[in-house]
Image: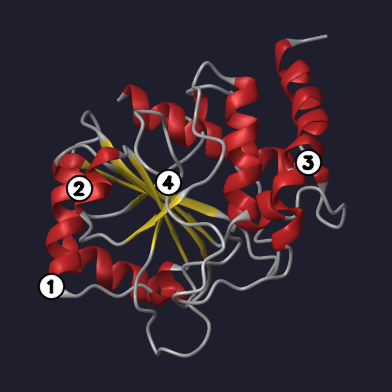
Amino acid sequence: MSRRTRWGVLLLLLIPLATAAAQGFRGRRRAPGNDPNPNVAYDGRLTFVRVKFEPLGGGWDLKWDHDYPRAETHFMKILDELTSVKPYLDGSNILAFDDPDLFRYPVAYVSEPGFWTLNEQELAGVQAYVHKGGFLIFDDFSDRHWYNFERRWQQAFPGLTPVRLDQSHPIFDSFFRIESLDMQHPNTGTQAEFWGAYEDNDPSKRLVMIANYNNDIGDYMEWSDEGFLPISLTNEAYKLAVNYVLYAMTH
């Protein structure tokens, strides 16, 4: 059995193990002031950080909380079992870009950037976070939502231009070797694209963010134990997430 095949088998075996802690939250929507999973204290271990923001247009749907907390619960279990990273498994954190605690964590996840907004404090916070070495993962947006994401990105980093990545980029070989980026958004069926931005627009320097456009790896991870999403794409979502974290921690 090849190394790649062994990893695929491990993913299939481990997904059910990651679900027990999350079962009580299936179908819930987190509401402000009513979070069943409070933030955890920093203890030096890698902790999943999800960024909160006031969603464009307001309303009851917070947008940034989509797939919470099952996606992170499942993913951190996979990361723990397959890599030498020993992440925090008993919770996760929700922080705004202007929260000083964000600087304790090297990777931050932003869901639904098609509805992302920034106030002045958050703007300064995201700029400082990236400049100090933080890595951003944008996920769960498609079609016209690109325009708001691009607008906010340029608001924060004028002139730092997102570029489309292909499978030759080292981020797709930082742990798993990902041979193909042929993937679709689980709900819209649109063809996934992967975009990044380099420090000083220089490909020889650090990649500071990756954007899963026309994709939603959080959704694949959240529902990976339910059986109604293709197993092959669920596995690819986990592989991408593992690669992102390992790349961010080694570059």
Q: Residue at x 18, y 69 (%)?
A: 155
- Element at badge 2? helix
Relative horizontal placement of residue 110, taking residue 12 as reference (left or right): left
Which residue corresponds to mark 3?
A: 232
For the rendered model, the colour scheme is secondary structure
What amino acid type is highlighted by mark number 1? Glu
Q: Residues within 10 Å of mark 4 (few under 14, many from 20)?
A: few
Answer few, some or many: residues within 10 Å of disc 1's Cα (few below 14, many 20 plus, some between 14 and 19).
few
Q: Point out which mark residue 120 bears.
A: 1
Tag of residue 129:
2
Q: Name the N-terminal-most of marks 3 and 4.
A: 4
Say whether disc 3 or disc 2 marks the residue closer to the N-terminus.
2
Q: Give the percent coordinates (x, y) of residue 201.
A: 18, 44
Q: Earlier in the sequence, mark 1 or mark 2?
A: 1
- Are the two marked residues, 3 and 4, in contact with CB atoms closer than 8 angstroms? no
Residue pointed to by mark 4: 40
**Which of label 2 and label 4 is nearer to you?**
4
Mark sitting earlier along the chain (2/4): 4
**Image position, residue 251 (x, y; %):** 30, 25
